[in-house]
Image (tube, helix red, strand yellow):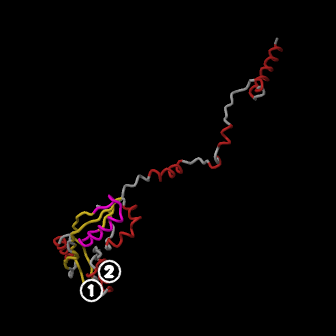
């Protein structure tokens, strides 16, 4: 009896081995195939697959997170006087798409400065600037070429504000400065262009003569 049981166990193990190895597939007995070898030929460059570490993954994701949709850019130039506006409007109407530009009435306030000079030449002005810099005084660039070789110690929209600054400077040892109007109030039109990057890229050369040397600034 014991011998029969041993023989049956050996036979059962042999049958299981043959079944698990697919040796009985021809008779309709085989385990369910767990892999999908048919997908292997469909792979595209599997050797290029690389697993990223945590730091590498964050660096790869950073440019996407840091690039929000760019808002339409607005640039302005001016103000332009009445004569300049006539030529400018003619150029804008023929060169730029409708709705990308407009001309607004604008007033550029007068510019008052605390002024030293004129000095006899550029070297004398440089020497004085060096002395003032040692006193930790803030110097402003001049916008009126007629005032070269001189030095601006502050620019203001009103004469009274410039007078206050002059009194402060006198207390710090500045004796020869005075207040003057560097540029009078200017009334005219301000040009504003929306989607400026695309518009100017295509029409920069056409607009340049009509701008009369006015620089572009970000819209306020």
Please name whichever residue, 152 or 208, is drawn nearer the observer in this view of the structure: 208
Asked whether residue 72 is in view, the answer is: yes
- For the residue pair 23 and 74, the one nearer the viewer reads as 74
Name the residue rendered at 36%, 59% in the picture: 195
Residue farthest toward the bottom in the current orientation of the protein? 120
Q: Nearer the viewer, residue 168 or 82?
A: 82
Q: Earlier in the sequence, mark 1 or mark 2?
A: 1
Label 2, secondary structure: give it: helix
- Residue most toward the right? 3
Region of the chain picked out in magenta, as a range: 78-102
Q: Quadrant of residue 159?
A: bottom left
**Is residue 16 rendered to the left or right of residue 215?**
right
Mark drawn on residue 119: 1
Q: Residue at x 64, y 46 (%)?
A: 46
Q: Which mark is residue 130?
A: 2
Residue 3, percent from left and from top: 83, 15
Expressed as whole percent of the image width and height from the top left, the position of residue 36 reads 66, 35
Element type at marker 1?
loop
The residue closer to the viewer here, 196 or 158, is: 196
Quadrant location of residue 205? bottom left
- Using a 10 Å C-alpha cutoff, classify the residue at mark 1 as few (fewer than 14 neighbours), some (14 to 19) or many (20 or more): some
Residue 101, position as x, y percentages in the image: 31, 61
Q: Is residue 46 above or below residue 113?
A: above
Q: Which residue is drawn at the image coordinates 20% and 71% (left, top)?
A: 185
Q: Nearer the viewer, mark 1 or mark 2?
A: 1
């Amino acid at each position: 009896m014991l011998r029969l049981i041993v023989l049956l166990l050996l036979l059962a193990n042999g049958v299981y081995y043959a079944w698990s190895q697919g040796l009985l597939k021809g008779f309709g007995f085989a385990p369910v195939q767990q892999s999908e070898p048919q997908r292997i030929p469909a792979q595209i460059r599997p050797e290029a697959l690389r697993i990223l570490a945590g730091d590498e993954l964050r660096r790869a994701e950073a440019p996407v997170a840091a690039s929000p949709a760019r808002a339409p850019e607005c640039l302005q130039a001016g103000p332009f006087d009445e004569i300049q506006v006539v030529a400018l409007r003619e150029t804008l109407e023929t060169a730029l798409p409708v709705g990308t530009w407009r001309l607004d009435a604008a007033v550029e306030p007068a510019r008052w400065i605390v002024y030293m000079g004129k000095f006899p030449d550029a070297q004398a002005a440089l020497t004085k600037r060096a002395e003032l810099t040692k006193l930790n005084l803030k110097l402003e660039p001049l916008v009126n070429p007629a005032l070269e070789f001189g030095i601006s110690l502050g620019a203001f929209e009103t004469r009274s504000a410039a007078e206050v600054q002059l009194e402060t400077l006198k207390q710090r040892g500045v004796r020869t400065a005075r207040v003057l109007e560097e540029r009078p109030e200017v009334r005219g039109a301000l040009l504003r262009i929306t989607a400026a990057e695309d518009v100017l890229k295509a029409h920069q050369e056409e607009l340049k003569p009509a701008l009369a040397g006015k620089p572009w600034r970000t819209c306020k």
